[in-house]
Image (cartoon, grey):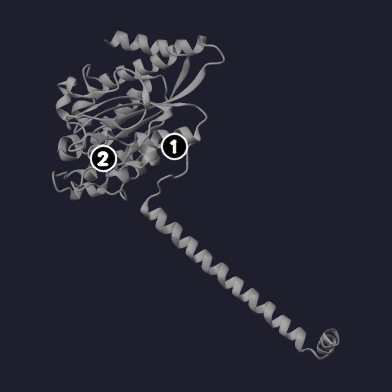
Amino acid sequence: MPTLRVALTALVLIVPAVASAAATDISVLILAGQSNAVGFAANAEELSVELRAPQMNTRLWYEIGSLESVEQPDLRIASGDAFVPLRFQSDPKRATFGTVIHGFGPELTLGRTVARDLDNPVAIVKFALNATSLAQHWRPEDENSLYAQMTKRVSRAMATLAIGGGTPHLEGFFWVQGESDAANAEHAAAYEENLTRLVRAIRREYFAPELPFIVARLSRNLANATTKSFPFVGEVRDAQTAVAETMTGVVLVDTDDLALADDGIHFNVESQQALGVRLATGLPGVGGLLWPSAGVMVATAFVLLVGGLALWTLFRRSAGRKRRRKQAWVSHPARADHRAQTLY
């Protein structure tokens, strides 16, 4: 199987080189991690009409599932080794998204934001499984790890784009994970080393030494979770920060102000939308908040209020000065005579 992955990767590199000049550049994004990458508990039925509708200019290749699907891949839901228009995903068995059938992760607004700001069509490969650990499940050196499975899917997806006449360019890797490692002292202590290894492996896999690697930092509010204990949240957060500070091109995205669902673990519908935009802005050339945080909205409202009051004060003062000048002009004896002659 490693030989197949190398061959597919080589195909991705060779086909663009011999393709015609008319070939379409396609920006490829990889979204990976655990349940907050999947979108556990984020009910797609609560989305706006616009976000529920498929986005035709952005494609999605996905394979997601529960922790049980690590050992039983047939329990996962997938796009069938093919791209589909970007939209929410559905699991009638309610194993992937918890109690809801239709769910989504940050990919909906991630794809829309990148497609809005880049000239190229966008293709997202989403590979994520609930409750998985970086230390246990995503080890690049293990032949059957989720890392190995993910890279095979990515290589096949990119080869599909190339064979279809496109020129795929891997633009960024988005990592939404850390909760499971925050529940285990040994895994938390090794998180910095393991994340560093993951970044290096991805960049080496796709011959992209400067590939942007965007990390959603673990929410500090996870420490208040009601359904499970995460005593090592601080250690994992510190590890994520350390990797971002020491490795070029690793961008940390803050999530502390994003509201969590009732379980205190998973992002709610609004937060998943905001997270996707924040992840997108970690890429060079992408910016602008479509779903600003509550803090940004409050700050903006305050600035507008202060600015409005200042303008109103200036207007009142200006109007008062004009009134006083007019009264002075009329009350002057010479001007009063002139006014009288004009009127009569």
Q: Between 18 and 223, which is closer to the camera in this rendering?
A: 18
Relative height, residue 262 to residue 136 (above, below): below
Q: Which residue corresponds to mark 1?
A: 113
**Mark whose residue sits in front, 2 or 1:** 2
Relative height, residue 141 to residue 225 (above, below): above
Which residue is at the far front?
344
Q: Between 179 and 326, which is closer to the camera in this rendering?
A: 326
Q: Residue at x 83, y 88 (%)?
A: 340
Q: Position of residue 8 (x, y in %)?
A: 36, 11
- Looking at the image, residue 72 sits to the left or right of residue 324; the answer is left
Q: Between 287 and 334, which is closer to the camera in this rendering?
A: 334
Q: Residue at x 26, y 10 (%)?
A: 1
Q: Mark 1: which secondary structure?
A: helix
Three-letter residue code for mark 2: Asn
Q: Residue at x 45, y 34 (%)?
A: 114
Q: Quadrant of residue 113?
A: top left
Q: Quadrant of residue 46?
A: top left
Q: Between 23 and 241, which is closer to the camera in this rendering?
A: 23
Three-letter residue code for mark 1: Thr
Q: Residue at x 27, y 43 (%)?
A: 267
Residue 120 seen in render = yes
Q: Quadrant of residue 89?
A: top left
Q: Residues within 10 Å of mark 1 (few under 14, many from 20)?
A: many
Q: Position of residue 83 (x, y in %)?
A: 36, 21
Relative height, residue 286 to residue 26 (above, below): below
Residue 279 seen in render = no
The circle drawn on residue 43 is 2
The quadrant in which the C terminus is found is: bottom right
